[in-house]
Image: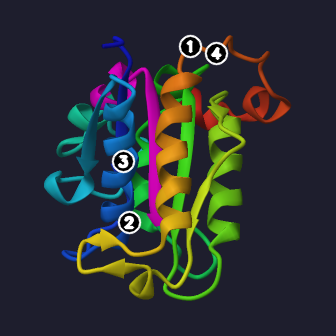
Amino acid sequence: MTDTHVVAVCGSLRERSYTRLSLERVLEAVGEVDATGELLDLREYDLPPMNADREEQGDSAAVVRRIREADAVVLGTPMYHGSYSGVLKNALDYCGFEEFDGKTVGLVAVAGGSFPVTALEHLRSVCRSLNAWVLPHQAAVPNASSQFDDTELANDSIDERLAVLGRRTVGFADIEPDPATFESEENVGAEGK
């Protein structure tokens, strides 16, 4: 067993969430390569809208600590209006360089319709501005309701794509960080939260 620990952050509040089911498959693959993983289900936390004038609010310290202590992170989101969810955005707003600098991040986006490419692009941009190392491989789950048979993936290619994401998140968790990006040097909000 490796000592790599992956936290998968679920940016969906739905009871029957295809994002959560997709992240569970990613975490299953994390376990298949003898690493540990856990789901950070944002439904379980009190996260009021982030107020930069306050140090902590609700359960923000617990969420930030779990992300900071992870060796790698997978961010999962449903696509809303061409981007990622406000729930995930709010959770990420509580974080900064301390949580993401040099950390490997995998991305999963789920859509009720066609490919959620813009949600993945937007998350990639946010992670880059925090100096995270975002895996080139990402997983998109389009037309989500037709991809699952109850709680199991019915589409073998999407199942494999999610599994590869889990394995690569572990495999690249110790990658040497890149030099700071221009975006991160200009991102003063992440320092002061």
Gap between marks 3 and 4, in whole Å?
Answer: 21 Å
> Image quarter for residue 30?
top left
Badge 3 vs badge 4, beta-carbon distance below 8 Å: no
Task: Give the alpha-carbon distance from disc 4 to disc 1, as whole Å.
Answer: 4 Å
Q: Residue at x 56, y 65 (%)?
A: 157
Q: Is residue 193 visible?
A: no
Q: Looking at the image, tell me whether mark 2 or mark 1 is earlier in sequence order.
A: 2
Could you tell me the amino acid type at mark 2?
Thr
Evaluate if marks 4 and 1 touch, with contact meaning CB atoms under 8 Å apart: yes
Is 73 part of what is drawn in magenta? Answer: yes
**Mark pair 2, 3: CA separation:** 10 Å
Q: Amino acid at mark 3?
A: Val
Q: How many C-alpha atoms fall within 10 Å of the one at disc 2: few (<14), some, or many (≥20)?
A: many
Is residue 168 left or right of 131 when viewed as pictured?
left
Give the structural element (helix, strand or loop) at label 4. Answer: loop
Q: Earlier in the sequence, mark 3 or mark 4?
A: 3
Q: Is residue 145 magenta?
A: no
**Residue, disc 4:** 175
In the visual, does 73 lie left or right of 64? right
Q: Of all residues shown, which one is farthest toward the front?
A: 156
For residue 170, side relative to residue 140 (left or right): left
Type of amino acid at the residue the image marks with label 1? Asp
Label 2, on which residue?
Answer: 19
* Disc 1: which residue: 174
For this orientation, the residue located farthest to the right is 182
